[in-house]
Image (cartoon, coloured by chain):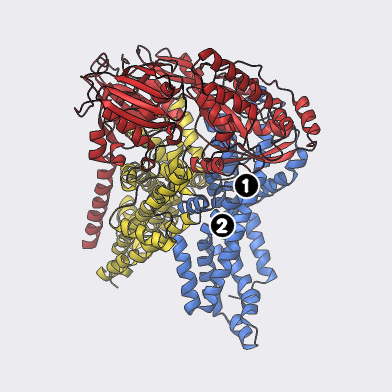
Amino acid sequence: MEPRSPSQFRAVLRRFVRHRAAVVGLILIIGLVLTAAIAPVSIAYDPYAIALGQSLQGPSLAHPLGTDELGRDVLIRLLMGARTTLMITVGAVGLALGVGASLGLAAGFHGGGVDSLIMRGVDVLMSMPGFLLAIGIIAALGVGTTNVILAVGIYSIPTFARLARGSTLSVKSEEYVTAARAVGVSNGGIMIRHILPNIMPPLMVQTSLRMATAILSASGLSFLGLGPQPPEPEWGAMLAAGRNYMTRAPLLVAFPGLAILMVTLSFNLLGDGLRDSLDPKLKR
Amino acid sequence: MKSRSAVVVLLTAVLLFFTSYSSVPSTPTEARAAQPGQPFRIIDSLEPNSLDPATGTGPFGTVQYALYDTLVGHNEKMEPTPGLATSWQVADDKVTWTFRLRRGVKFHDGTEFNAEAVKFTYERILDPATGAGRRSVYTVIKKVEAPDPQTVRIITDGPFPDLPFLLLDRTSFILSPTAVRKLGNAEFGLRPVGTGPFKFVEWVPNDHITLDANPDYWQRRPRSSRVIYKVVTETAARTAALRAGEADMVMNISPNDQNVLRRDSNIVLVQKDSLTQVQAEMRQTMPPFSDRRVRQAMNYAVDRTAIIKDVMMGLGRIADSPGPPGVWGSVRLTPYEYNPEKAKQLLAEAGYRSGFEGNLFYVSGRWGGDDQVAQALQAYWAAVGIKIQIRKADMAGLDDMLSRDPDTMAGWIAFPVRTSTYLDYHLWRLYETRAARMKGYQRSGYSNPRVDEYLVKARSTFDLNERKRHYEAAQKLIWEDAAFVWLFTRQNLLGVRKGTSGYEFLPTGMVRLHNAGK
Amino acid sequence: MTRHIIRRLLYTIPVMLVVSLLVFGILHVAPGDPAAMLGGEDARPEDVAAIRAKYGLDQPLYIQYGIWIGNALRSDLGRSIVTRRPVLQEVVTRFPYTLELAVAALVAAVVAGMSVGVISATRQYSAIDHGTMVLALLGVSTPVFWLGLMLIFAFSVELRWFPTGGVGSWRHLVLPALTLGAHSMAIIARMTRSSMLEVIRQDYIRTARAKGLVERVVVLRHGLLNALIPVVTVVGLQFGYLLGGAVITETVFSRRGLGRLLIDSINSRDFPTVQGTLMLLAGSFVLVNLLVDTLYAYLDPRIRYE
């Protein structure tokens, strides 16, 4: 394998654009980011202000998705919830990617003692089912947005560490790495300038797929009451609150769930598309 | 090929292993009407931690009422009546009480109920090693004597006219000394022995408790021959079980389910005023809550009527007194109106024109609507500039907060529920300086020397009219001080299948099953 | 072969030790004083101190760990702070509910997932293939709690076919098992499809076809058994996912299993119960992976003849 060249990049791009589902996923994600960015400016109602007399109303012109149990506008809270969700998942996956990829890269590159030390540490994290580990971490640190980021981030580290290590191993003996070493490039330099760019593609694919998992985990933790606390709008928590009113206002449960489903689906589509276009051999 | 068949064998073995496990739980779910002779099935909301009256003090008294009796009984309004004691009087020294005991009463283990058993029960509550949850309330009892098997003498620490009220409390259920000595405290809580209408049969943890009628009960023989008590923690599942006929009685129905149940012709929904007050209690020895205007503003900022109507679905009575409504001596005053403008003005006068920040601390999930009421408070206060962070706690966390030095944690508000069966206990533990600063009590730090004076006076006389006057004066002062943000008194919902009768639904939310049946 | 299994068995010992350290350590990072909890709302400081001494909460951590792991090995997990009953009793009485849920979900996921995968693979690029793969994609993207609530709304509240929650008969198990299994079902379907496609293209299948065997026989006898190998590995991992998902599923369906117990005891800071629950859940994860590895060794010739 050679370092990626501009022509290869164009080939990847071409394959990606032809992957319709992936493009749809990407568009939805861009939409989500924009929504989250403009939500605070665009709102007609205060997402926190209650109006008890108007609680549990169905969709209307004034409230397109109705109101919740305290009379707050559901649409506005969903939009604000997109911010919370994005913040948590980007934070968690960013943490896992940063820590995991560095560890995996170091382990694969150095090998020997460093490798086994790091990988045993990763094994420790994998000795428990991920979601249970996340719950355990929250049991220790307490509930709240920051701790959900940490919990979901920590349990995602092994995925990235293993992937980065594997890819590093396959790249490390390539000619251009040996060449760089021969001309006296430092270890750090080799890792950052020669290995990292070449292990990025699988990491990118994994990041996108992991975002999907992270959204499901984080909203699951919120659903259990371990995530962001009221009145902070968060999709999982909104769903949990709406649960008590399911017979009277089923839409209160339906909408946040659809939002989570759509965002998760988008990241899964994007991840699948990225994988197929980066590695056409796998595509059937 | 050989290894293939090995795989098949292994797979089968694994499956068998799993299915043998998964077939363990099986409970009858078909609807069965309870006939005489058929078990009376009741579903409650919280698995007891222990049936020991001293340590098992959660809201699962229904089982305990079936198992035990108290020395002083009570009627449906929680007023004293003869119980295991037929009569009692207090001597002229105002501290020596003499109780005459009922003859011929036996514990379920066959041992005799007598003065020694009473002495044993009360001394056990007072023994710190027992770990009785309400021990400190009982420290007013200085000495328990048993001069003869039918007489108990109690000497109190100073005059304490409400002793009968204390002795009708669930903590003072009389238990068999023989059984406690034989089993030890922890085990006794799992295999309780009392004198009550029903005998303990078995407790399958997280599944059910079975009780059988006590044929030798000292009152009328219980109407149902067997009681099966189950616990279902989720409100929706309890409602579904009631509708499916899986139980004759379901406790703690959520306000949200009342409309569905009222439409069901097989179900009777009993709505009853409780003694449980919902209120936000501020720590007030430091700013901002040390300023009475701030506390008043917080009272004016909240729309109680809307909370009761739209969050509690009508199941509450607006707070109009610091005392529990309906108990002797509790006065009715004018509720704080919803007036956010006045609230803002009071805050501005107190120097908080731009508001301040604080924390609201509570245990979530203890009663239907608690999360929503907490969020409503948060929003109402935010509207007048007070930014409150909601902090859900567990019981330990809440206890920890309540037991911290009152001069710490400025800006913190506790949001517990308070169920008191008599006025003196309620006013003392929440508003008297001594208790409000005592570790393990309210510790809001509320203090008004004139309130203290009235409360001490009210306690030192046995003249009911005089006591009432003092309590009234104290309550008015507390109300003007806006000691807390009083919201409402809850109304409890009990769901029963049509035809069920004879049960006594108490204002503490529990049920006496002695005469219950179908 | 035997050596492989023995090595794998021995390997579970350090893994369980690590799990126990995690479980123990995690909870001792927690802020707050569990001793205060025991006393209840009206406890006095001396009562709290007595309780602290009784439960060893005033000892250094490594001693507490030593006591704890020593007791755990003698199957004594301490007493629940909330119910005051032995933790072992608490977790053992609830374990069957979680196990029946996880196993039912797994069986549903494997049976449905593999069938769908095989059908898709044999009809590659057909409408059925596309349709099921879209469903599978939805399956991996749907939050488990939402799926559960929607199923409750449709089949319990509206149609009244199944109870809304609780445990008991098989009817109580249908919706929770479907809810929990959906995600794994989707993953297994995708996995089966791609490994079937790979196998179908290989020589021995062509040979089998050339011998004139009926297509169905070819697919089932030759294709499926070989495609099973990667699927078995996924099943082991999925079991871990199912145990985690059971926490949510049990909350949605009010099932009194281990997952529900875990959340309840976190909320009430019932240290011994949280530890016992996590240990049992993680332990069964380790055990199932041991089983899966063994199964894998039987299935995969490369390990069998090592």
Q: Please report, as a chain letter, where disc 1 is located.
A: A
The x and y percentages for residue B1 are 23, 61
Residue B298's x, y, as percent? 70, 30
Q: Is residue C120 visible?
A: no
Mark 1 is on which residue type?
Thr
Give chain B's shade.
red
| Residue B17 appears in the figure | yes
Q: Is residue C39 above or below residue B261?
A: below
Q: Secondary structure at mark 2?
A: helix
Q: Could you say which disc has been placed on residue A85 in the image?
A: 1
Crowd around label 2: few <14 · some 14–19 · many ≥20 (10 Å) = many
What amino acid type should be assigned to the residue bearing mark 2? Gly
Q: Is residue B230 left or right of B361 when viewed as pictured?
A: left
Q: Is residue A222 above or below residue C62?
A: above
Identify which residue is drawn at 80% across, 36% down: B353
Q: Circle 2 is placed at which residue position? A: A153
Mark 2 or mark 1, which is nearer the start of the sequence? 1
Chain identity of mark 2: A
Q: Nearer the viewer, residue A241 or A107?
A: A241
Q: Residue B179 lies in what quarter of the image?
A: top left
Q: Quadrant of residue B48?
A: top left
In the rendered image, residue A18, in percent from the top left (x then y), is placed at 63, 55
In screen coordinates, is A62 left or right of C150? right
